Image: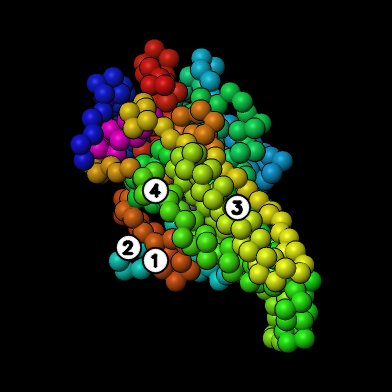
Amino acid sequence: MDYQVSAKTQTALDEALKIAEIKKGVDFIKDDSQNTLKDQLELVVIPAPTFQEEERAKAVAEKFRKLGLEDVHIDGIGNAIGLYRGTGKGKPIVVEAHMDTVYPKDTVINPVIGDDGFVRCPGIADNTSGTAALMGIIRAFKETGIKLNGDIFFVGTVREEGMGGFGGIEYFLGEHKDIAACVCLDGVQVGKITYQATGMTTCMVNFYGIGGHAYGAFGKMANPLHAAARAVAKIADIQVPAVPKTTYCVSNFHAGNDAGVHAIVPQATIKINMRSNQMEPLLKMKAEIYKAIEDGCREETERWGKDTITYDIHEYFNVPAGSLGLNDPIVEAAYAITKFLGKEPSFNEGGPTDAAFPICNGIPAVCLGSGDVETNSHSAENERFPIDGMWRGPQAAFLLAILCSGIDGKVESIL
Ligand SMILES: [Zn+2]
């Protein structure tokens, strides 16, 4: 890749790596990785579907406490938080990983370590890997005694997946207005750097009519299911840019029931997900989709000229879009650190991660993989995590936290 890290950022990393404690911390994380794996295996069996993270949050907080973090607590939305005190010469930073998984509470979770060196079970990668990596990073700070200029908040967040809409990180940042940077761990591949925030709107649209008999009421009323279908057909034709990546999907279409196969339904419902890595195309697409809904209702109403199809839109959440520059110091530092760890860095095009909220709110943030190589996630049968090299994700986050905050008299903050 044709990408250049500025001399300033590269020098900051090179100088930091000359410091004995920092080198020791990096080596320690590797030597300690069996403990991190143990944390991972303990946490993964605690179910934590989005909105039901309480049990896992308690276990994460308990681990924070045992590792000696200060002010360990679970906040108002359910995030597990612990503080590693700095020297008070800088603003605090965050090192975080989301705790929730995409699997229902009754999913059987039985981690198995295979001969190929992979652990398999639902949630082992996304994101128990990131959550366990936090423990390895905390132990490295404890072991070396490194104190950064600012405090570090270690946070296990809730509500990252699915309908969570990044609610955990949003809540945390709402409560802590002075955060200087966020290092997020999600996904497994070290060096896969997410520096953009994919904006998103997910909504439900209800179409309403009178409803009646399929035969007897025909011609006397409009059909809300037909109005929904007209709207969906129009939505399907909407053109969006490839760059910045902009997408839409009608993800749910529901009306009627088996008993009503001979009925004009009184209501139809669709759900739509829209995303973009920039705000302007996201808003433009959203306006076109909402116009398609309006037009679908109007055309179905006019087709019969009797009753009026009405609709309402319920937006589940709106996540803003945004992007750091490729040469923002935190992005450059993540790249240079990956190279130092012997891996090839790459930039993710957008991607929904907890880094989204800080990025959109002007706080430098990147999301890094928490292990070594790319694996499957969000698939109960195939989710797996490579043990070999698992130290690289926490090593990267450890170094990035140091560069972001700085160490008084030794390492200057890159921010
Ligand atoms: Zn994840």
Circle 3 packing at 10 Å, graded few (<14), some (14-19), many (20+), is: some
Marks 3,2: beta carbons within 8 A: no
Element assignment for label 3: helix
Of labels 3 and 2, earlier in sequence is 2
Marks 1,4: beta carbons within 8 A: no
Residue designated by label 4:
241
Looking at the image, is mark 1 or mark 4 nearer the viewer?
4
Q: Is residue 29 left or right of residue 147?
A: left
Of labels 1 and 3, earlier in sequence is 1
Tell which of 231 and 5 is nearer to you: 231
Circle 4 packing at 10 Å, graded few (<14), some (14-19), many (20+), is: few
**Stretch in magenta:** 330-341
Find the distance from the CA under tag 4 to the CA under tag 2. Answer: 41 Å
Circle 1 packing at 10 Å, graded few (<14), some (14-19), many (20+), is: some
Q: Position of residue 216 (x, y in %)?
A: 77, 86
Relative to 326, residue 237 above or below: below
Q: Amino acid at mark 1?
A: Ile
Of labels 3 and 4, earlier in sequence is 4
Q: Is-magenta flag for residue 315?
A: no
Tell which of 257 and 38 is nearer to you: 257
Residue 137 in sight: no
Q: Residue at x 43, y 35 (%)?
A: 323
Residue designated by label 1:
113
